[in-house]
Image (cartoon, coloured by chain):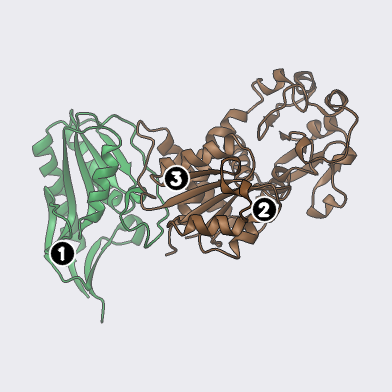
Chain colours: A green, B brown
Amino acid sequence: MKTILDKRKFNIVIERLAHQLIENHYDFSNSVIIGIQPRGIYLSDRMVPYIEKIIGHKINYGKLDITFYRDDFAKVLHVPNQTEINFSIENKQVILIDDVLFTGRTIRSAMDAILDFGRPQKVELLTLIDRRYSRQLPIQADYVGLVIDSIVSQKVKVFWNEKDKKDEVILINENK
Amino acid sequence: MALSTKHLLGIKNLTKQDIELIFQTADNFKAVLNRPIKKVPSLRDTTIVNLFYENSTRTRISFELAEKRLGADTINFATSSSSVSKGETLIDTAKNILSMKVDMVVMRHNVSGAPHFLANHIDAAIINAGDGTNEHPTQALLDAYSIREQHKSLQGKKIAICGDIMHSRVALSNIYCLKKLGAEITVAGPPTLIPKHIDSLGVHVTYNVQEALEWCDVANILRIQLERQNTPLFSSLREYSLYYGVNKKMLDSLKKEITLMHPGPINRGVELSSDAADSHHSIILNQVENGVAIRMAILYLLAGKNE
């Protein structure tokens, strides 16, 4: 077990990602943020108020559940979470937010799901951790908190203060 | 989380947790049904046969719609246009259909216990869409779901079920379902249409519909199942309507607002008058709308493998 992001660095990374979004989307007049359920919303819930504080107004922020769009339905049954998108994404720049980018399958499902709500002008991906070299689909993130090299048998676990009482990212070796 | 059962044969063998999981999943599907694109691809690799040995409008359309909204492939089967009229047995029919790689069976049959029988002989998941005078689980679930939507919780709610209790599978499934969710139930109707010893299910019995309406928060009015009555159990439909029918005047005479339900099809002017059925008390069309979400939830939960 190894800590790859401690509490102090954790917040610096999230703030950096927020600034990167503002750099590309200015006042968010044509951009919306969509957190992916269940764990992506911990990240988006932190970033959205921070961005709103800097730019001085509310932005369109939704939550997306991808359960019904998964490709492993025949293997495992997942219980769905809430989807809340109370605005149109038609011709908007959509920023998808998730905690860990691993095989790319979640993001594939999320893109399918988001297209059922309309036709965005552009879809971007922001992720806290990018597990490089483990992709099973040709999907890349536009904004990355931290890139790590890991093997498939290892696990990356993100702890959130809101849920787990601490902010930390650790790398676990399964066979240990 | 997963259902405790492989088939949905009746409410009798569901747990309270099962029912709550179905409701929670249905909430999500109801949201999907209100989107511009009312479809998700969850069951795109699943084929479902709708095996209907008895007539149906709502249940059949509702199931077919639920299946299509989940992206499943569907086959419809009606006895009148099939080899059943040439003498093929239920098991043979089912086995032949399943050998064409069908994953799930939605089944309605005029004989009580037919889906239970089939469940012992085939591998596919079976959903009971009504068997004889036994159970109609999806109707009970959508009824309870609609009450929950109106009244938040079913705990302690007073529900009157009025009409032909004897021949109604909706009545039995509703009693099981509502009791499991903590509601109180009174059945009301003519003595000949209320089974003896029904109080052993923990329900109150009255032969006075007005009294039941005064007591309840929600009234579920059932149709007279003339097709299942071999001997006359009341003198005439006019007399039935006079003594046991529900009309707007009765609803207006109550000191409180009650919710009015009916599983359909309504015989207007018999168990329920038109002015009552179309009044603001009625949530009959909400029931139909919720039916699709409930059936999507059941199909989804039974098609998936347990974690």
Q: Which chain contains the residue that carries disc 2?
A: B
How busy is the neighbourhood of tag 3: few (under 14 within 10 Å), some, or many (20 plus)?
Answer: some
| Numbered label tally | 3
Label pair 1/2, CB-CB below 8 angstroms: no
Q: Which mark is residue A134?
A: 1
Task: Compare residues B274 and A153 and report the one nearer the observer.
Answer: B274
Cα separation between marks 1 and 3: 37 Å
Circle 1: element type: loop
State the quadrant of the C terminus of chain B: bottom left
Q: Which chain contains the residue that carries disc 3?
A: B
Q: Amino acid at mark 2?
A: Lys
Residue situated furthest front in the rendering? B86
Position of residue B152 relative to residue B256, above or below, is below
Residue shown at the point (88%, 25%) measured from the top left: B239
Q: In terms of image quadrants, where is residue B31?
A: top left
Task: Compare residues B129 and A103 and report the one nearer the observer.
Answer: B129
Q: Amino acid at mark 1?
A: Ser
Residue shown at the point (81%, 40%) measured from the top left: B229
Residue situated furthest left in the rendering? A23
Task: Compare residues B39 and B29 and report the one nearer the observer.
Answer: B39
Circle 2: element type: helix
Q: Which mark is residue B180?
A: 2
